[in-house]
């Protein structure tokens, strides 16, 4: 049996509830991963819906040496006056070959950590990301697309794309699971094809 992989989900106050569910549940249920919830200081946070989340641990790099991957979930606080600094954790995971993903405003944490310097990436729009993190390293690698982008071990997505974020993230973490990923993609695509 393959070794179980551990994925951290970084939440901050005001997190976007719709951005992590498909990824977290699919990773655990279909891929046998272990999902771990993190907040900057290890204290509970509240999502946009008002749901409270009590994390498993803090986002300190030394508490998360077991993570194979990290997904940074969006919140308006990522572009507030004093956003949390996740750079040490993100660069630690990236430097050991882990997958680092960001969705919606969570992409700002990756930009600040310098992870887009050599990776194609996306966010909530070229003007949006530059408006919040002007002149970030790698801004010329921006891809203006409505779906997730994976380049090497870096995965990014606009907030409107939790489905392709889940797929791209899991494909990057489990490249050997092509048939399972194809089934997942078909399942997601069918919902939209039949509803339109």
Image: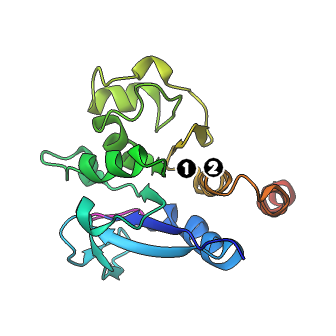
Circle 2: element type:
helix
Seen at 26% across and 64% down, the residue is 59
**Relative to 89, 179 lies left or right:** right
Furthest toward the top, the residue is: 140
Badges 2 and 1: C-beta atoms under 8 Å apart? Answer: no
Residue 128 locus on image (x, y percent): 38, 32
Residue 121 versus residue 80 in the image, above or below: above
Instruction: Give the mark count.
Output: 2
Residue 177 locus on image (x, y percent): 77, 59
For the residue pair 186 and 110, the one nearer the viewer reads as 110
The span picked out in magenta is 12-16
Question: Is residue 120 one of those drawn in magenta?
Answer: no
Seen at 41% across and 58% down, the residue is 73
Tell me the quarter of the image containing the N terminus.
Answer: bottom right
| Residue, disc 1 | 160
State the image quarter where residue 15 is shown. bottom left
Q: How crowded is mark 2: few (under 14 residues within 10 Å), some or many (20 or more)?
A: many
| Residue, disc 2 | 172
State the image quarter where residue 62 is shown. bottom left
State the image quarter where residue 37 is shown. bottom left
Seen at 47% across and 31% down, the residue is 125
């Amino acid at each position: 049996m393959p070794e179980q992989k551990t994925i951290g989900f970084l939440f901050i106050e005001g997190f976007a509830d719709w951005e992590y569910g498909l990824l977290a549940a699919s990773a655990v249920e279909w891929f046998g991963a272990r999902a771990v919830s993190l907040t900057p200081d290890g204290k509970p946070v509240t999502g946009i819906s008002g749901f409270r989340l009590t994390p498993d641990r803090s986002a300190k790099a030394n508490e998360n040496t077991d993570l194979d991957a990290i997904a940074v979930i969006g919140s308006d606080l990522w572009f507030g006056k004093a956003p949390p600094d996740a750079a040490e954790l993100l660069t630690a995971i990236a430097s050991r070959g882990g997958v680092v993903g960001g969705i919606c405003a969570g992409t700002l944490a990756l930009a600040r950590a310098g992870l887009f310097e050599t990776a194609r990436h996306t966010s909530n729009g070229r003007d949006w990301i530059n408006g919040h993190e002007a002149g970030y390293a790698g801004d010329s690698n921006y891809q203006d697309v409505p779906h997730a982008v994976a380049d090497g071990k870096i995965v990014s997505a606009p907030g409107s794309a939790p489905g392709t974020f889940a797929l791209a993230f899991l494909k990057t973490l489990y490249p050997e699971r092509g048939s399972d990923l194809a089934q997942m993609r078909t399942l997601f695509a069918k919902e939209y094809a039949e509803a339109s």
